[in-house]
Amino acid sequence: MSILNKEYELYVSVKPVRREIRVLGIESTSHTFGVGIVEYSGGRVKFLANAYSQYKPTSGGIHPRESFLHHVNNAPSVLRKALELAKLGIKEVDAIAVAVGPGLGPCLRVGASLARFLSAYYGKPIVAVNHAVAHIEIGKLVSGFVDPVIVYVSGGNTMILVQKNKKYRVMGETLDIPLGNLLDTFAREAGIAPPYVVEGKHAVDICAEWSREYIALPYTVKGCDLSFSGLLTAALKIARETRGDKEKLGTVCRSLRETAFNMLVEVTERTLMLTSKNSILLVGGVASNTELRRKFEYIAEHYGVGFYGTPPEIAGDNGLMIAYTGLLHYLYGLIKEPNSVFIKQRHRLDEEEYPWLP
Ligand code: FE2
């Protein structure tokens, strides 16, 4: 079911506004070029448009230059589609939001250039959004969770976070490669991808169905931090020895997935115990993974806390989350001039204060 035209109560208090506020958000940090539009009125946020085009490598991983060219070629049609979906002209938009990082430099520049142009040419305020913060904010809005333990898992990030004193605080994170990157790299090197995802299932999940066996692999948890590189190396070594034996490769896939996901669940449980929060919010591209959600549903039930995994439509990279987080910035007066908006490839989400946080 589409998320478009759905309305959500804004959970933070802001000054009353006299009319509808519409924000257009641009996402271009990695493989997705997306434009989303949200509308705010009467304390409610409505999703008006979520248009996107995705660069899909035919071999290997994401090549920044190829992804950049994809974004350049598709930006005009995606922008047009978003405005069509929202039944709006660009002049009816109140502010332009753009993801300025973290992400791939060439890709980020496409979104930033378009945003600066729209802002300067049409005289619209511009808002710089942290991509990671946007993943979390849209999850909080849709779930209704105000102060959860946040598990942010994607191709480029793996973090366990809580909010305190107006900042996102990192309780634990990967010390080397992110979870999504672990799954993609393994699938590619083991010869089962690309495509990385078929009908919503990751190649590792499809492969895991070929076996019911489990073998022990390196499980590295340090406090609330995680390390996946030893797990990747060990799993790939065994995968190369399977020499086309489908069932044996299935065992490696199942074991890799179970080990990685259980590590993530362990640090989430620890954070839950340390902070006494009463809900878990799963966000980022890997939040769509059915098996990961099942594990979190299980522990949430075990501890009697709430759980919400963002739906696939907004779990991966999208312009809607940038538009919504841009709206929060706008309502709190965090507006910039077009010539002061720069990309930041390594834009950590715990660097800045956000006035709407508890
Ligand atoms: Fe992302």
Image (spheres, grey):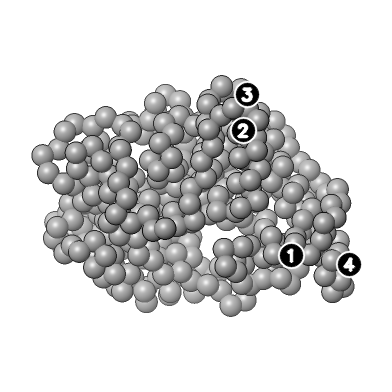
Percent of width and height locating residue 289: 60, 53
Percent of width and height locating residue 155: 57, 56
How many angstroms separate mark 3 from mark 2 (CA)? 14 Å
| Cβ of mark 3 under 8 A from ligand 1 | no
Crowding at dot 2, Cα within 10 Å, few <14 / some 14-19 / many 20+, comes out as few
Report the mark closest to the observer, 4 or 3: 3
With respect to residue 210, does 215 lie above or below? above
How many angstroms separate mark 1 from mark 4 (CA)? 16 Å
Identify the mark at residue 207; answer none if there is no mark: 1
Crowding at dot 3, Cα within 10 Å, few <14 / some 14-19 / many 20+, comes out as few
Disc 4 marks which residue? Answer: 241
In this rendering, position of residue 67 left or right of residue 224: left
Disc 2 marks which residue? Answer: 301
Between residue 345 and residue 185, name the one nearer to us: 185
Q: Is residue 84 visible?
A: yes
Residue at the image position 31 percent from the left and 74 percent from the top: 77
The three-letter amino acid code for the residue at tag 2 is Glu
Q: Quadrant of residue 113?
A: bottom left
| Mark sitting earlier along the chain (3/1) | 1
Q: Are marks 1 and 4 in contact (CB under 8 Å)?
A: no
Q: Quadrant of the C terminus?
A: top left
| Mark sitting earlier along the chain (1/4) | 1
The single residue placed furthest to the left in the displayed view is 18
Q: Are marks 4 and 2 in contact (CB under 8 Å)?
A: no
How many angstroms separate mark 3 from mark 1 (CA)? 34 Å
Circle 1 sits in a helix, a strand or a loop, which is it? helix
How many angstroms separate mark 1 from mark 2 (CA)? 28 Å
Identify the mark at residue 148; answer none if there is no mark: none
How many angstroms separate mark 4 from mark 2 (CA)? 39 Å
The three-letter amino acid code for the residue at tag 3 is Met
